[in-house]
Image (cartoon, rainbow, N blue to C red):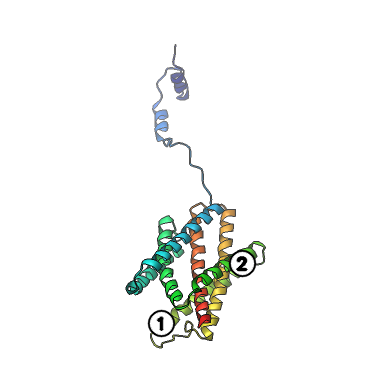
Amino acid sequence: MPNPVINQFGRAAGGGGNETPSPAYLQDMFAKPAYTGPRPAVRYMTLDDVVQRTAAMLGTVLLAGAVTWVALPERLYTPVLITAMLAGVGLGLFMAFTMRVNAATALIYSAAEGVLLGAVSHAFESRWPGIVIQAITGTIMVAVGMLFVYKIGAIRVTPRFTRLLVGATIGVFGLMVINMIAYLFTPDGLGLRSGGPLAVIFSLVCIVIAAFNLVYDFDMVERGIRQGAPHKFAWFAAFGITVTLIWLYIEILRLLGYARN
């Protein structure tokens, strides 16, 4: 009894049931790509992805900060602070400009920022007891408030809003850099961090800009989900939210320190 598979193969080659395939048919079969199985389904970013990754980054910040607060000897504060600051700034700029954010880089950044915040917070708490919990509470309240006004549509992220926000953010960071350079020539720099009225105004401006940056972060997440961004983009979104919350916390901590004075 003739083999039906061989018969079908021969017919496809252009011959009878038991004929040898032609060289042209064999060459065509050889040139076709090998079967590698079904293509994996494309996974898109979800809100749960962003929430989980943001929680992981903030949890790492809190853990590293707590360990630094409890275990770091005072004699090591300065070198550890400088190292953590350089690592956080360098890695943060790399991720921001290249958009190459994954679990490893995001959590290393969070750990560096946690060490920095742990040391700074401990110094503030030693001078003004209770100030850290006030700063954390203030940060949470601002974040929840901005999420609320965003969800009800009170603030809309338009192209004009984005341009103004980016310009304001670059402007305040530029002033921070100039202020640091000015410390080389005068003890108070430009007066932006000296604790006087100008410093209070500058911190208030930074808090407002950081709060509006949270609105932009929320909109980025919503647009990414709506437009079908790949799930790996969730790490970049979580990174943006974490950076803004850290900045907001530091500015609120500074402002409370001025008020305690």
Image quarter in which the N terminus is found: top left
Image location (x, y in percent) of residue 39: 48, 40
In terms of image quadrants, where is residue 212?
bottom right
Circle 2 sits on which residue? 145
Q: Residue furthest front?
A: 129
Give the answer, above or below, for where 230 lies relative to 151: above
Q: Nearer the viewer, residue 106 or 57?
A: 57
Q: Which mark is residue 237?
A: none
Q: Is residue 78 left or right of residue 231?
A: left
Identity, as a three-letter code, of the amino acid under mark 1: Ile
Q: State which tag comes first along the sequence, 1 or 2.
A: 2
Kindly identify the residue that appears in the image at 47 percent across and 57 percent down.
Answer: 56
Local crowd size for mark 1, using a 10 Å CA cut-off: few (<14), some (14–19), many (≥20): few
Q: Is residue 174 above or below residue 152?
A: below
Q: Which residue is denoted by mark 1 in the rendering?
A: 181
Q: Quadrant of residue 163?
A: bottom right
Is residue 23 depicted above or below 58 in this figure? above
Q: Can the viewer see residue 214 in this picture? A: yes
Q: Residue furthest top?
A: 1
Whole-number angstrom distance, CA of label 1 to CA of label 2: 35 Å
The front one of 32 and 42 is: 42
Front in this rendered view, residue 172 or 57: 57
